[in-house]
Image: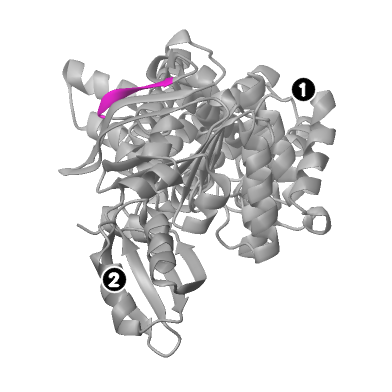
Amino acid sequence: MKTTWIIAKRELSSFFDSLIAFIIIILFLGFSGFFTWISGADIFMTGQASLQSFFSIAYWTLFFFIPSLTMRLIAEEKKTGTIEMLLTKAVSDRQVILGKYLATLILIIIALLFTLPWVITISRLGNIDTGGVICGYLALILMSAAYTSIGMFASSITSNQIVAFLSALFIGLFFHFIFGVIAGDMKGILGQLINSLSVNVHFESLSRGVVDSKDLIYFGSIIFLGLFLTEVSLSKRNAFK
Amino acid sequence: MDIVIENLTKRYGSQKAVDNISLKVATGEILGFLGPNGAGKTTTLKIITSFIAADEGKVYIGGKLLSDNYNELKKHIGYLSENNPLYQDMPVIDFLNFCAKIQGIETSRIHNRVNEMIRITGLKREQHKKIGELSKGYQQRVGLAQAIIHDPEILLLDEPTSGLDPNQIVEIRKLIRELGSEKTVILSTHILPEVEATCDRIFIINKGKIVADGTAESLRNQSRSSDLIKVKIEDGEPDQIYNSIKSLPSVSIVELADRKLNRFDIHCADKNVKREIFRLCVEHNWVLTEMIPFETKLEDIFHDLTMN
């Protein structure tokens, strides 16, 4: 656990040193803020003291930003060879993967923390559903955790960051969008099954303020599967020089 | 801790990078690991660090099977890899702190240990610079520092002196010798004088197979190329001397190197040659003014063993 934390700290400071962290936070706040407050179905148009519009915007912005954070995690170390230097030290593959995962998740949570002033502002505008807001944030964090896990896997299968980025988006697109569309055209058990694979279904139900164990298990499974596949993929390093 | 390798084989596709290698390195021994490019040196080292797995064969470190205990055994290994990959965007001192922490050095000792590494490798003035801004030689020093920071019992060095200046090479070799008195060291290199200067034993592989294993001395004895002696004999006719030396049983080839100065190059077949030349001179009342033995160079042995 201690080793995992050391790796997470290094990774986190590398996010900030390379300015990636600042750029992501600014872009995330900029995009989300623009559509929450200024344009489209913003708060003043809906006229409700609710963060629903922010959550549905963040649902998309995080989807695009997370692969850009995860793409370098392992691919870059493979490219420069530092993965060899790191893994020949007293650390296991799993500690490295968890450390990097943790660092990315912390960065996303930091970005989300910067939106707390919006919550305070809105709560002054009217009667806000505190439980709903907490659940909404929980939904965003769980979704981010799932996509980070997928992004890690995408980063572990290649030494090219662009390939890692596009693979993460491609895999993510199925969960984010395509499963829902396919399920819409289908009837019966298969349709329900595919529909239940869609992130949207679970995100909606969580952000409406209902914490269902089904949703928690769903996100937990994606996180676990992503990290597990990352470890499998990293252990297959025999072929690369 | 000793290292025992048994029948190690590693394939990349259909090509065998390492082919049935067995090797023992005792504690406190410095092994020079030689071979031309692509001979399988780096692959063997990577297998010992457990970074990659072997297809066949076993590696024991300190009597424990590596494939079952690698997470524990890795703590005792210090590894400087060939390309010396480092986090280019980290300052030297932060990087060494990170390495110290990750290798499990106690928090109270980290500061001293990092400073000691900076002193040993002469990085005092560069310690706050980013690694990517350093020259190759300085990066090599950082690589060496990260390999020995946790005082490992086994040290695997893949071309440790590449990119260093001559003074630094001498210092690093001295450091390796010092470390090697209590540690097990495998030093992979192309630089043959380096092996002679630092290693107790030499291990040569070619195309994944063992071609030689022994001390520099024993390899010379094995080698096909014979020892050379240069002599200068005065007070005699060159042709007469030439013929007499040629008839000696322990001499294989004689060359008249310089007719005016009566210099001869003698390739000897066995060790009696010096005595026989001396007796020959006494017999004929010639004056032996020079006799310089030339040992077979390690380069020649290396060439013989790896070029067929």
Answer above or below: position of A5 versus A238: above
- Picture coordinates of residue A127, whole percent (x, y): 74, 25
Question: Between residues B182 and A36, which one lies in front from this camera angle?
Answer: B182
Q: Quadrant of residue A131?
A: top right
Counting every numbered tag in the picture gives 2
In the rendered structure, does residue B59 fall within the stretch colored magenta? yes
Q: Is residue A7 left or right of residue A203?
A: right
Q: Residue furthest bottom?
A: B260
In the rendered structure, does residue A25 fall within the stretch colored magenta? no
- Picture coordinates of residue B98, whole percent (x, y): 70, 37
**Which chain does the residue under circle 1 lie in?**
B
Q: Which amino acid type corresponds to the residue marked 1 in the rendered image?
A: Glu
Q: Quadrant of residue B63?
A: top left
Q: CA distance from mark 1 to mark 2?
A: 73 Å
Q: Secondary structure at mark 2?
A: helix
Instruction: Same chain for labels 1 and 2? Say yes or no.
Output: yes
Answer above or below: position of B123 versus A151: below
Q: Residue at x 46, y 62 (%)?
A: B293
Question: Between residues B281 and B118, which one lies in front from this camera angle?
Answer: B281
Q: Secondary structure at mark 1?
A: loop
The magenta stretch is B55-60
Q: Is residue A33 left or right of residue B21?
A: right
Mark 2 or mark 1, which is nearer the start of the sequence?
1
Residue B106 numbered tag: 1
**Do the residues under discs 1 and 2 have CB atoms within 8 angstroms?**
no
Q: Quadrant of the N terminus of chain A?
A: top right
Q: Residue at x 33, y 80 (%)?
A: B256
**Which chain does the residue under circle 2 lie in?**
B
- Confirm whether residue A101 shows in the render: yes
Mark 2: give few (<14), some (14-19) or many (20+) Cα within 10 Å. Answer: some
Residue B244 numbered tag: 2
